[in-house]
Amino acid sequence: MAIHPAVRHGAMLVGFLVTAAGPAASAPAPRVTVNFVAPERYTDAGDRVGAGPGLRVTLAEVRRIIEGAALRAMAPGDDLRVDVLDIDLAGFAHPGLSPVSSPRVVTDVTPPAFRLHYDLRRGGRRIAGGDERVSDINFLFGARANRSGAFAYEEDLLRDWFRKRLTPQ
């Protein structure tokens, strides 16, 4: 069966236009902006007793966690601004223990906590936001035995919070 040259030319033109417009036609990737407001005054983000990561390391890790958790939960084209107002890491640094191993004593009464101000926009219009204290007193019940790292509890907490707040319904 022969295809008329005009039909073949039209099909090629449509294919070219779809290919050329493909990336431009899709929604832009979500964007996350994280700001740390007066981090030197945070409850527990710096190395005050020589038993943990310094403030710069903590802020870099919290930024990584927030960006990753938010991007997994957001819809294409969303823009999110998060102002971190306070950080209180899980547990507490024990001044009598070895600063070389950076131990933190974690108990059920020392959950991680964050104070955040967030603003989620879709198409330039605000769809969610406000000030929230993010914490979970039952954080050890959901703790995964195979998780490790200096910020495992904080990562679990923030990932769950962003999934609940930002995932489109």
Image (cartoon, rainbow, N blue to C red):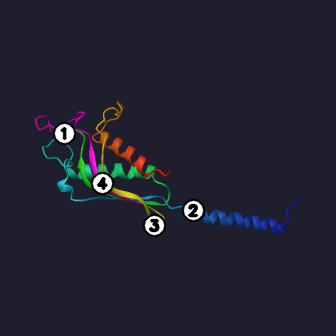
Q: Residue furthest left?
A: 96
Q: Which marked residue is nearer to the observer: mark 3 or mark 2?
A: 3
Residue 92, numbered circle: 1
Where's residue 29, x and y in %? 48, 59
Q: CA distance from mark 1 to mark 2?
A: 48 Å
Q: In the image, what residue type sits under mark 4?
A: Leu
Q: CA distance from mark 3 to mark 2?
A: 20 Å
Residue name at image x 66 percent, y 63 percent: 18
Where's residue 165, x and y in %? 41, 50
Camera-side residue: 126 or 79?
126
Of the two numbered discs 4 and 1 on the same chain, state the one appearing first in sequence: 1
Of the two numbered discs 1 and 3 on the same chain, state the one appearing first in sequence: 1
Q: Residue furthest right?
A: 1
Question: Magenta segment: does it hold 164?
Answer: no
Q: In the image, what residue type sits under mark 3?
A: Gly
Q: Which residue is mark 3?
A: 124
Q: CA distance from mark 2 to mark 4?
A: 34 Å
Q: Which residue is mark 4?
A: 116
